[in-house]
Image (cartoon, rainbow, N blue to C red):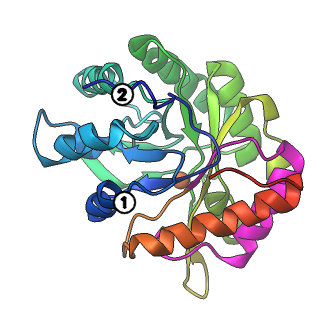
């Protein structure tokens, strides 16, 4: 399956995370969305229902691929079969962006559904940067790595999370997917300044932003990606656009308690309003 000649292989403006509950909405009305982000771990099987729909959607929209399963920060060898399958999907759909997370998800043969944070040390920088380098070489392209939200910290960490993130991407020569909700959740849970975090990231490497919702558990914030974006994250988004400009593609990411597609469109509209305020110009969806 190849992309229609009229579809440009580029992510611009405010995209939406593709979820199976919305396949019919999207293909039925072809909404004016500039791109969709695909949770590519759900498309790893040959054939079947997900690829049937992805084939059709890719005819109309640019895609980004978002992975949760590479365990870039893990201690076990990278899973070469998964990377090879990811490469075959990249060859097939030619996504504009490919990303995974700065975390570990597997150990001793067990796989976690949580994206677990790493210790923030120079040794861990070297470790994860070498693995990102392996993945980029195997895929034959640059990837983006995304910051995760966290609820615990390692006593051995001697770098801040932002310093760690910046050192990893420089050392691996990869790009940044900056999840503003995740920064806000971690900043609240660990009592650091979210804006100070943004200031420490290398601007030239920031290729995508994520916006999502968290749940307030009282003593801490839980990153559920199951609610609308909260006011403090919108405020952080506005500050980020003021700092980085409004040309970084933004994604509305909603993974749990999936709402009607119209709810995601309304979230997209809020992001566009902020973008317009920053640029002073109308922004194409
Ligand atoms: Fe995210």
- Residue 108 visible in rendering: no
Q: Nearer the viewer, residue 25 or 183?
A: 25
Depth check: 66 or 51 in front?
51
* Image x and y of residue 194, in percent: 79, 60
Which residue is drawn at the image coordinates 45% and 54% (left, top)? 17
- Magenta region includes residue 230: yes
Q: Which mark is residue 29?
A: 1
Image location of residue 46, percent across then percent down: 12, 32
Label 1 crowding class (10 Å Cα cut-off): few <14, some 14-19, many 20+?
A: few
Quick check: 142 left or right of 39?
right
The answer to whether residue 164 is magenta is no
Residue at (66, 28) in percent of width and height = 169
Q: Nearer the viewer, residue 203 or 115?
A: 203
Range of magenta residues: 224-251
Q: Position of residue 33 (x, y in %)?
A: 51, 52
Question: Can residue 65 be seen by looking at this rendering?
Answer: yes
Q: Residue at x 60, y 78 (%)?
A: 220
Q: Residue 68, relative to residue 125: is it above or below?
A: below
Identify the secondary structure beneath mark 2: loop
Distance Cα–Cα, label 2 vs label 1: 19 Å
Q: Mark 2 near mark 1, Cβ–Cβ under 8 Å?
A: no
Q: In the figure, is residue 239 to the left or right of 69? A: right
Q: Residues within 10 Å of mark 2 (few under 14, many from 20)?
A: many
Query: Looking at this view, is 99 or 131 the one in front?
Result: 99
What residue is pinned by disc 2? 3
Q: Secondary structure at mark 1?
A: helix
Q: Residue furthest bottom?
A: 218
Residue 25 position, x and y percent, is 32, 64
In the rendered image of this protein, does residue 148 appear above or below residue 192? above
């Amino acid at each position: 399956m190849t992309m229609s000649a009229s579809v440009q292989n580029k992510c611009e403006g405010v995209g939406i995370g593709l979820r199976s509950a919305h396949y019919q909405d999207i293909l039925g009305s072809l909404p004016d969305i500039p791109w969709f982000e695909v949770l590519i771990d759900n498309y790893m099987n040959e054939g079947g229902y997900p690829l049937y729909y992805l084939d059709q959607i890719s005819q109309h929209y640019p895609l980004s691929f978002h992975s949760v399963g590479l365990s870039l920060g893990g201690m076990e060898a990278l899973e070469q079969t998964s990377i090879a399958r990811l490469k075959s999907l990249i060859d097939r759909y030619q996504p504009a962006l490919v990303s995974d997370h700065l975390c570990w998800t597997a150990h001793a043969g067990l796989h976690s559904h949580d994206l677990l944070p790493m210790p923030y040390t120079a040794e861990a920088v070297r470790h994860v940067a070498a693995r990102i380098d392996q993945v980029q070489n195997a895929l034959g392209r640059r990837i983006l790595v995304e910051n995760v939200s966290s609820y615990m910290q390692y006593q051995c960490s001697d770098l801040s999370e932002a310093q760690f993130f910046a050192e990893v991407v420089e050392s691996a020569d990869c790009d940044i997917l900056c999840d503003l909700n995740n920064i806000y959740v971690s900043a609240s849970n660990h009592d650091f300044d979210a804006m100070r975090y943004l200031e420490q990231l290398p601007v030239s490497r920031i290729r995508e932003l994520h916006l999502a919702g968290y749940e307030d558990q009282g003593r801490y914030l839980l990153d559920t990606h199951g609610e609308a974006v909260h006011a403090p994250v919108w405020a952080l988004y506005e500050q980020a656009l003021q700092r980085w400009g409004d040309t970084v593609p933004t994604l509305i990411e909603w993974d749990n308690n999936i709402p009607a597609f119209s709810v995601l469109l309304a979230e997209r509209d809020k992001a566009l309003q902020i973008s317009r305020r920053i640029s002073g110009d109308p922004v194409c969806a």
